[in-house]
Amino acid sequence: MIDPLIREQFPILELKQGKSPLIYLDNAATSQTPRCVLDAISYYYEQQNANIHRGAHYLSRLATEAYEQARERVASFVGADSSREIIFTSGTTASINLVAEVITSRLSPGDEILVTYDAHHSNIVPWQMLCERSGAILRPIPLREDMTLDMEAYCAMLSPKLRMLAFPAISNATGILHPIKEMIASAKSASPDCLCLLDGAQSTGHVELKLADWGCDFYAFSGHKIYSTTGTGVLWGRESLLAELPPWQGGGEMIKEVRFSGTTYNDLPYKYEAGTPDIEGNIVLARAMDFIDTLGIDKIAAHEHALMTQLCAGLESLPGMHLLGDSSQRGSLVSVLVDGVHHYDLGMLLDQMGVAVRTGHHCCQPLMQMLGVTGTTRYSVAAYNTKAEIDAAIAATARALDMLR
Ligand code: PMP
């Protein structure tokens, strides 16, 4: 059980929208920030703020130490072998773009990249751009009607030409948790040269991370979806692989020596961190990870699962309501379609009743096109949501649908 008192650590959850308490069910887009992270932000600017790595002075040493300790913390959070495997980025999008850039020279015309149909645009467009650069071909892996992966179709698509398999551990549009280990093992057995990137934007902070067991080569996620701040994120990559790949952006910090006759590049992880990073953001990300680990990922997962079971049962009982995807494979979000009701109208009415959900295509336009819809209404939970909030959200949805029909 998650102690409901953890809500006291989130000042924003006390906000009222008019007379209604604010019920925040848009956590898949951005989660709220606990006091320990807010305090760490103030502490950084009051006690530590300076540029890192190159300064000889006291404050720069303090900031550098806090920054590198944060990297160690992230490494232990994701179960990395070494903090050299942790690249700080501005989020999942930047992490995926980084990988797509640096593997360019490994691809030749006719090579293949596979992504699942439910991939986020940030896990589609960088690969399309890579295909434009390299002549490789991007192919979408179909889903079944219940939004789970069509394993048979997937296995039939595998060939020695495969160079990259990229997919979300949990889809942000359907909530479905994919069979990660099986997918990666099949890709690697069909093509030993295939690299696998897992988009962890919706799995991090919700389920236990098992990067080694899953067998992925890269794992990307964002700070603002795990109780930390916007503009931060991580790319985890296998050290041997990152060491042999070329650098991405050029600039300060990513170099060893710069001469007009040629430049040598820095060691990992600095090779991939050109310029002044979000120093405070990456330091406080470590505090958000402390918050998650103090609650316990197993407890968070069990709590969110109970909330989702309650939410799905309540929504399913409403007339004309269709939940996307098989609920037995569900992460901490659900997308719904309602007969005769536009997703935006439902979202607007819920907002008027103090319930925050997300409407639209969720940056998954190919999936929406496959479903023949322009968007869905998405409810997503976090560790601080309560059973009472879920009851209220279900009741508000029922009222909204009565008004819309
Ligand atoms: N992938 C998934 C599955 C997501 O849910 C999101 C955010 N909605 C992203 C990628 C992009 O994350 P960010 O905007 O933080 O880079």
Image (cartoon, helix red, strand yellow):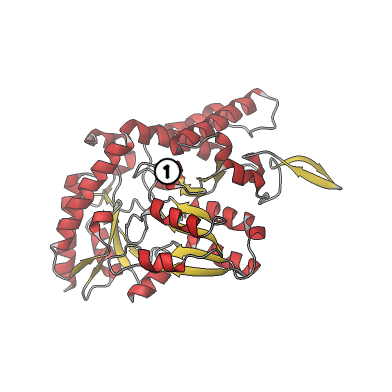
* Residue 163 location (% of width, % of height): 56, 60
Q: Is mark 1 within 8 Å of ligand 1?
A: no
Residue located at (21% from left, 67% from top): 322
Q: Image quadrant for the N terminus?
A: top left
Residue located at (24% from left, 33% from top): 5
Using the image as rendered, state which of residue 67 and residue 344 is in the foreground.
Answer: 67
* Residue 50 location (% of width, % of height): 62, 32
- Left or right of 238 on screen, residue 76: left
Q: Image quadrant for the C terminus?
A: bottom left
Residue located at (46% from left, 33% from top): 76
Q: Name the residue under label 1.
A: 213
Residue 352 position (above or below residue 13): below
* Residue 246 location (% of width, % of height): 68, 50
Residue type of the residue flagged with mark 1:
Asp
Residue 246 position (above or below residue 72): below
Few, some or many C-alpha atoms within 10 Å of disc 1 (few <14, some 14-19, many ≥20)? Answer: few
Q: What element carries label 1?
A: helix
Q: Is residue 283 visible?
A: yes
Q: Which image quarter has ligand 1?
A: bottom left
